[in-house]
Image (cartoon, rainbow, N blue to C red):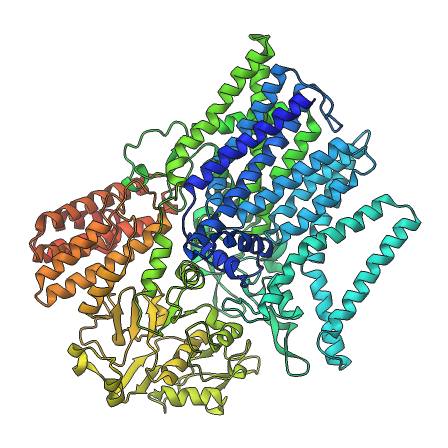
Amino acid sequence: MQRYSRLNNLVGWLVFAVATITYLLTLEPTASFWDCGEFIACSYKLLVPHPPGAPTFLLLGRLFSLLSFGDVTKVSVLVNALSGLSSSFTVLFLFWTITMLAKKLVLGRPGMHDDRHAEPSSGQTLLILGSGVVGALALAFSDSFWFNAVEAEVYAMSSLCTAAVVWLMLKWENRADEYDSDKWLILIAYVMGLSIGVHLLNLLAIPALGLIYYFRRTATPTWTGGFITLVVSSVIVGVILAGIIPGLPSIAGWFEVLFVNSFGLPFSSGLIFFLIVFFGLLWFGFRYSKQRSSRLLNTALLSLVFILIGYSSYLIIPIRSSFLPTINENTPNDVLSFVSYLKREQYGDRPLLYGPQFSAQPYDQKEGAPRYVRGKDKYEIAEHRLETLYRDEDKVLLPRLYSPDPGHIQQYQKWGVDVRQTQDPETGQTAYAKPTMGENLGFLFRYQMGHMFWRYFMWNFVGRDSDVQQAGVMWPNEGSNSGLPERIADSKARNNFFAIPLLLGIVGLFFHARRDGNNALMVGFLFLFTGLAIVIYLNQPPIEPRERDYTFAGATYAFAIWIGLGVLGLAALLRTVLKSDSARGGIAVAIGLVAPALMAAQGWNDHDRSDRYNSVDSAKNLLNSLQPNAILFTNGDNDTFPLWYAQEVEGVRTDVRVAVLSYLNTDWYIDQMKRRSYKSQPLPISMEHSVYQQGTNDYLPYAENPAVKEVDLKQFMQLVEQNSPLLQVQTQSGRPLLSFPTRKFYLPIDTVAVEKMGLVLPERRNQVVSRMEWDMGRGAIEKKNLVILDMLATNNWQRPIYFSSTVNTQDFMNLQPYFQLEGMAYRVLPIKDPGFNPQSNQEGYVAKDLMYDIMMKRFAYRNLDRADIFYDENNLRFPANYRDKFYRLAQSYVDAGDNAKAKEVMNYCFKVMPDKAIPYDYYVPQFVVPLVKVGETQRANEIMDTMTNRAQQALAYYNTAPDGGLFDLEVQLNLLTLQSVYRAAEQVGDRGRATKALNLLQQYYPQQGG
């Protein structure tokens, strides 16, 4: 036994070493896109990230960041390494899990019992350990798992928690007959509690663990007993999800409001009372279990206590929030706001088991539960959450087609839903016909399960078509790249595993089910609950901003168990030709290793992020576009989180205040903007909290008053702050709302003061206006727009105000004539661009010398010229934006007659971002005209030919591909490219190339014409 145990430990750690080396070699050295920048920043300074937070991850991330020893540039790679090591330990625990299950099969001892003292022979040991190696490495090199391992996200650590509890449960199963075996169950409970502070996905392993417990404790298990176990386990999951995580703080909040508001006691008195009662009940429970000698009750209570100990990591959220840190999302600094944070109330909810379809028409709204906020001496009702009411006949069981968003309704049609418009007999308004239950379930099976789960599953074990969003599965017979667009054919993410891992896993599944049904059932339910059950719970809409394969890492882990056990299945098939255990085991292991070896070879180049700096460079470049003490309005996620990383961790441009537009619709974020942050003074917001608190002035509708032709912005803001009756309109519910009486706004400008501030470039002095005038052009002013208008009225041009160039044009509020393009941002100035053309989609006057300094000297474009580095779809968006700004700069020099400067700018652009590394995008054809003007006709022709050929190839492919309808964005981008080529060729007099582009446009989009 000692020999096998030593080998099992040794090989496990060797597998761990292989995984660790792999992840450290391919780790991203900076903050990746999406949530990673936020998590690294919040780990480094223990800040408060978006709900529901991840305190366990943040605390461990903080410990890892301390290893930077003051070198802030190392913080990101250290927190990324936390994910890498989490993944390596997941692989290690998976190896030991597989070997425990394999040992039962190899020794012919299926079921649940103590196998520790059974010593396998040398050949059997080779087979057992080999199966563990194959399965563990298959997980290590799987697409989604590897992706999670090299960036600072919570999913790697969540997988570790899942792997740890499954391994611990199997350790308990081997020791269940020992008097102190329950300590393993208590340890599992503690890990579960800790995992709540990472991600809730880990809780879905509980039903599988429940089956292990049932099969081990029951001498003659039955199907009925197994079903009851699953029901009880599912109830435990529900109790933790609803009863413990938000439930206990919710009860505490109820007591808090009761004691403070009704009894007049001090703040926190209700919370203290709740804690006394709760711990008193726990003490009574333990005392009762001891009196009755109830081991089960005592273990259950201990498990509850240790879940709560693990869950207590969440205390860091209100503790840190109370110190008002620079990132403090939702400000959950008291028990009531903490409950809202845990429940993710800012994101709304989706119907799960019963609810309306997209065709349902609401007939009323009612006030739901009040939302309390802490006042001066009691809790005050900030608002009542409105509940929309639908008729019962409009509701269905398991509503999948629930979203009334017009874009979503359009997408539903791609999945077999017959979207029909009808006339409502009661109102006479146009409405949608109710989808059938067949269409509802068809969407569930075809899209939610098929496209959003099984497609991802196949990516990991069959092959992936490309990195383009909606990319399909690459089947073994699709090895040829003939007829494919370059974007797909040349994608480093185009991986073909020839379905070898899938086939090996299927062999393992059938072998396991046949030889050890109980354990196979356990693995099966682990796969089911961490895969298809999540599909039911998430109820995903028909389009997502990015691929969601990382969500199903638990199912990938479960299937990897069967890949490992597939080696045993291969050995069993070889039994008739090879009698020697060692020979049979060696050949089976060698064949099995083909799967992870192929996965590693195919996946290395698209998972290697070791020299990728694009996300952080884009953030620093945006910040370095701005003048000192600037205010920058941005979108969320990829526009903001890298900026937070750059400022919070590396200390880049902390004089700039980043204001996230979507967050400006909330009162807590506006409060934060009114406080100082590092070198940035509070934002110039004049409105008091009562004016913008949640539920107040969330939006101001347009209510035309013919007597008001235009409105002075400063006077309008004064009326808003006074809640003036002049702006009030009555809603159908009788509740008054503030409105705006005209779309035409103006802001008087003190031109003399503006000149003295040095805001005006010498060439723009005659463009300064005495009055800024614009048309809001919208039916309502959201709270975020109100805040921007307030700042424009209050700031008096003391601080530079910018919009990121990636902000949605609707948020510009038609201020574009007053934009000045500076790097990657538009600065708002009281200077009107005489050349502004609203049809050109080119906002902002180009300040040539300033832009030249920013783009050519300040900006960093690290490794965007390296063709060996994989830049996926998200990473290609920001370089496209650079190219657009390089074009604007070059064209402005051409317009000024400085062709030498224009040529220098364009040459530099194509040097730092060549086509071989960053493929030409739809902005590139714009360069044709200035290239011809400066004598670079050959390069201009090469661009037109390359872009035309690529667009022709892509459109031909998507027009005939069975799933071509899913790639609307790719089709639109290629049509835009052809339009740009056509216009450019027309402008330079190249009729041949213009005709070719026009013919292609007419072929694939006839109504577009030219």
Q: Relative to residue 638, is residue 944 depicted above or below?
A: above
Residue 433 horizontal/vertical position (percent):
51, 57
- Of residues 193 and 52, the one drawn nearer to the viewer in this rendering: 193
The image quarter containing residue 849 is bottom left
Residue 609 horizontal/vertical position (percent):
39, 44
Is 295 on the left-hand or right-hand side of 342?
A: right
Q: Is residue 23 visible?
A: yes
The image quarter containing residue 883 is bottom left
Q: How many numbered marks, from 0 up? A: 0
Is 285 on the left-hand or right-hand side of 253?
A: right
Q: Quadrant of the N terminus?
A: top right
Q: Residue at x 34, y 82 (%)?
A: 798
The image quarter containing residue 792 is bottom left
Instruction: Report the residue that reaches farthest toward the right.
Output: 291
Is 648 on the left-hand or right-hand side of 87?
A: left
- Of residues 518 and 454, the one drawn nearer to the viewer in this rendering: 518
Q: Quadrant of the C terminus?
A: bottom left
Residue 899 horizontal/vertical position (percent):
8, 61
Q: Residue at x 27, y 57 (%)?
A: 882
Q: Relative to residue 103, is residue 980 depicted above or below?
A: below
